[in-house]
Amino acid sequence: MKSKKLLSGPYLIWSLAFIIIPLLIVVYYGFTTKEGDFTFTNIAQITTPENLKALGLAILLSLVSTIVCLLLAFPLAMILSGMNVNQTSFVVLIFILPMWMNFLLRTLAWQSLLEKNGVINAILSFLHLPSLNIINTPAAIVLGMVYNFLPFMVLPIYNVLIKIDKDVISAARDLGASNIQTFTKIILPLSKPGIISGITMVFVPALTTFVISDLLGGSKILLIGNVIEQEFKQSSNWHTGSGLSLVLMLFIIISMAMIAKYDKDGEGSIF
Amino acid sequence: MPNKLIDIVQVSKSFGDNLVIDNLDLYIRENEFLTLLGPSGCGKTTLLRILGGFESPDHGQVIFQGKDMTDLAPNKRQLNTVFQKYALFSHMDVAENIAFGLKIKGKTQTYINDKIKYALKLVNLDGFEHRTPDSLSGGQQQRIAIARAIVNEPKVLLLDEPLGALDLKLRQDMQYELIRLKNELGITFIYVTHDQEEALTMSDTIVVMNQGYIQQIGTPEDIYNEPQNAFVADFIGESNILPATMVEDKLVKILGVDFPCVDIGFGRNKPVDAVIRPEDIDLVKPEDGIIEGVVTHLIFKGVHYEMEVTANNYEWLVQSTDMFPVGTHVGITVDPFDIQIMKKPESEDEEAVAIEE
Amino acid sequence: MKQTIKKIYLGLIILLLYAPIATLIVLSFNNSKTRAKWGGFTLNWYVELFQNESIMNALYTTLIIALLSALIATVVGTMAAMGMQAMNRKFRTVMMGVTNIPMLNADIVTGISLMLLFIVLRFSLGFTTILLAHISFNIPYVILSVMPKLRQTSRQTYEAALDLGATPIYAFFKVVFPDIFPGIISGFLLAFTMSLDDFIITHFTKGPGVDTLSTKIYSEVRKGIKPEMYALSTLLFVTVLLLLILINAKPSKKSSAASLKVKKRSRISQIILRRVVPAAMALVIIAGGFFYATQNSAGSKDQVIVYNWGEYIDPDVLTKFEEETGIKVIYEEFETNEIMYPKIQSGAIAYDVVCPSDYMIQRMIENDLLAEINFDNIPNIEHIGDEYMKQSQQFDSNNKYSVPYCWGTIGILYNTTMVNEPIDSWSVLWDPKYANNILMQDSVRDAFAVALKYLGYSMNSTDLDELTEAKDLLIEQKPLVQAYVIDQVRDKMIGNEAAIGVIYSGEAIFTQWENPDLEYVIPKEGSNVWIDSWVIPKNAPNQENAEAFINFLCRPDIALMNFEYITYSTPNTAAQQLIEDEDIRNSTIAFPDASELERCETFRYLGDENDAVYNSLWREVKSN
């Protein structure tokens, strides 16, 4: 049995080198100046009005996107889990297939759809309806986030829903619960692990994206992800960038703690 | 004579190409312990689910206290179900599980608390209010499921093979518990099982089902002693089922030998099936028996000895507290009263179980 | 009723999911170079796709990295899962926590942490770093796929095998392994997929000349996606669709009449799964091995690493250079001077020849980042007009470090069908009449130049009051601005998406070709005149090749080729003579006369501190 433990040796070394140490390096850069002195200024950068704005906007948009995803995903997961086995794999296929298209191209395609002279407005004007003008606004960014992250909300909820014993639902009905009561008292509480999992899988990427705000926000809208990316790639301001990233990681750690609290058995994973 | 509570009229149900219940008629009385008994796939669980409202029949009606409840939603019916795998709400504790139906009905908290205490006492689980379902054993979960159901004072309790997952001793204890419960509550129990011993132990009435319709209805004694066809005979208890010829009233020819019996009205020289229970066969000295044979197998079963005796080219199953070693020549006699004559099956549908010769 | 609602809802979601994909597919057949117009049906792009070397390269790189990283991750991950299974609870929880980190952490943080790691280790960014990064984020997916299967596998079957005489290894491969195999396969596929689609982490860990599909697409977003990309994505989509259908052809438990057909289908899918797919993978891996070797033999071959603006050279010129000199060109693009500078300054990547703008060259000289050019190797410099060499002295005082490449002005491009009056002033960019119809340059100096000139100040101002005034003006303007763009201004103006845009003179010429309704004007308040020149960084590994490259570009016929392709004015007077089209030769947009140039300023480098001020003011504008 000892030899079995050794099997994870390579991974232990790898994770140390490529997961732990890089993060420590970020911490180092975050707390030092270019000359190597210890400082809090990098972290304090978050308090500048533009950065606060970027952070606040990112939090707002990702919250909205997460909620929209949740509202869309739950009914979808319920419909999918209620279908019989033969149909299920086909339908799941349909939902996974778009994820195989390149993420940038998919998001970019929304530009074509949403533009002033884009496809949607072409159709709307054909039907003599008012045109849709959300490109380059936060609304477009939310749309992009929801579009890209919806599957990550659907899958965990779906996984939890199919594990609910059908008899439990029947029991609730048998005991007098209406459809709504069955939903609120039984299905919803039992799907909590999946919901928590889904929320984390959507909120964190949405919070930290820079590509979506880049492509759909017309470079007018600066999210915290954009700020950090620019610090690294444009200004090569690694110290500031790391400091801001540390603040970001704080949010991520909070979400990890939330998962650990609500989902001790690991039921709500995506697998 | 207790009143009719439920009337099932000409109910049919198919799943895809599969006809599961075929034009079934049945009535159920108040304060009755009625068991639906049959092998897997015979339609008993489906029938129970139709009563509970979880399935709708394709044709036919279900009348409850004179009113048609065929299309009524499950949460509006005055029945409650105890599910096979208990279906307790894992995110609630025992008290909340039991209180569930009462809360929906809007009862006051004091009422609910009293009822919970009463229900737990009834199932011998006092003090379990704050336990969680996954900390309970199978038997305890079963009893909580029962408590949760009866606390709503249903007129009928539906039980879907509730004891299947329990070990033998616990199962037997629970069987007595259920009978006691029924008597205390004074309500109808409709019980589904494939275990004929269970059915015989607990029921007032047994409905034997196979392939979607009723084979026989009767009290346990009736079903056991006077099975009306080969299927029932074979399903309930052990039996020797032999093809025979009815010579005339009160005389049947089995394996070429005349056996006096007590049944009449089967015609003259008509082919019939004869059923003889293993415990009704007496083994005597060869010259004293109606036919003679040799003991080929012997097994000690605790309660009795089980032996196979080959006589007239048939392997008779015999149960007796007397022991005859393998190889002994014995004589077989049967009291005429213990021979049950049945009509030969008229269609293939009745001939559901292959009879081993 | 309930059923129809469900179906409608499902249908709506599917519509949402597939709308962009359908758009991409349709665009792949669009016979027009820009996204904005429909020009008829064509299969052209599919043909061009396979001839486009850089896209094919990117595709190949993507596939190889995905395959290799997925494979390695699967091996390491499976071993890790098995090892962790045997650990005690506490340690296992810790390891699972570590495993979860890359999955839960934001991609951007993972990306920058790895980038910093490589930089600290002085490991030059390139193909290998991408591969290492991909393996790192793939392993957790494998572990999380295999662990549940391991937990489910009954210990008893393993013990049964041992009981029957098997050695532990034999028992593992014959009993445990087949059991967890579905988990391993799904882990592999998951890793493969995540690697294929990754953008953010690759974005941070890649080096020059190496692109995956995602990074290639991103670099093209600014300019306008080449339609070949749409063709490629359509092909990928169709391939995946077919694969998934084939593999998922599950026989239903229905009547036997269909079962024969079904058996045949499942046999085909079996064959594909068992034989074709592994064979294809093996082939790709072996080919990939060669590919990797060629990618990494960076040092051995004769090459020149070029860092230039996007769409700023005729690709045929590069091919010609390679053919005539035998020197391989590795080509990287940047969007703005401000993005280019830190890369050169940090020395993380060593380029041979770069094409910055005037003021940036001045900054680079002052920060001692450039090498003096050996003009003996560039005899063709005689073709560059004297006036341009003189103008260069504003930032390169002795003409020691730079060779002019392109020059031009910045001005206003407007659509005469959407704008009724003649334009001659920057003020039109603040006119509420054109709200949401205005495009501004997404670059700090250019944006401020517009505001400062409009206010009557110098675009090289360092006066805080003036700058603050300009900043406030820009913030005031922001609600009217449709978008801050760089090269996309071209497509958008051609497509009538906006009425007015700030644009470079070179782009203006191109847009007029495509959309005759467009006019270009240098406002009366004055504008910017600029020169982009070639320089050689001090740490260039192949300086002589760089000089040969610059010399090649100064050849009149080559300068002409470039001019005709990128339409930016050339300082090469010999090439100017060779321009055939009179209209263009005499165009005031391409070659404005002295009076127009008088009111134009050149950008100067203002020093790090002032740069920081500009940057922070610009940040305020962007985040407002």
Image: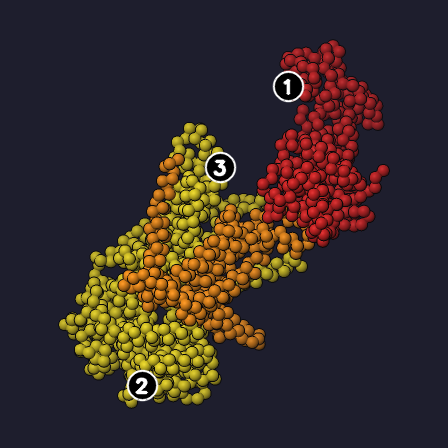
Q: Are marks 1 and 2 on the same chain?
A: no
Amino acid at the residue labelled 2: Thr
Residue C568 visible in the current orientation? yes
Are there few (<14), some (14-19), or many (20+) residues within 10 Å of tag 2?
some
* Mark number, residue C154: 3
* Mark number, residue C588: 2
Q: Quadrant of residue C315?
A: bottom left
Name the side, left or right, on which C261 lies relative to B104.
left
Q: Nearer the viewer, residue C86 or B109?
A: B109
User: What secondary structure is marked by label 1?
Assistant: strand
Name the side, left or right, on which C441 lies relative to B5.
left
Q: Residue at x 77, y 47 (%)?
A: B62
Q: How far, Cα to Cα, is label 3 from label 1?
A: 37 Å
Q: Which residue is mark 1?
A: B300
Give the chain of mark 1: B
Residue A232: % across, % down? 34, 64
Amino acid at the residue labelled 3: Ser
Name the side, left or right, on which C186 lies relative to A18.
right
Chain A painted colour: orange
User: What secondary structure is marked by label 3?
Assistant: loop
Give the chain of mark 2: C
Chain B painted colour: red
Relative to residue C244, is residue C50 depicted above or below?
A: below
Q: Which chain is yellow?
A: C
User: What secondary structure is marked by label 2?
Assistant: loop
Residue C286: % across, % down? 32, 50
Q: Nearer the viewer, residue A172 or C600?
A: A172
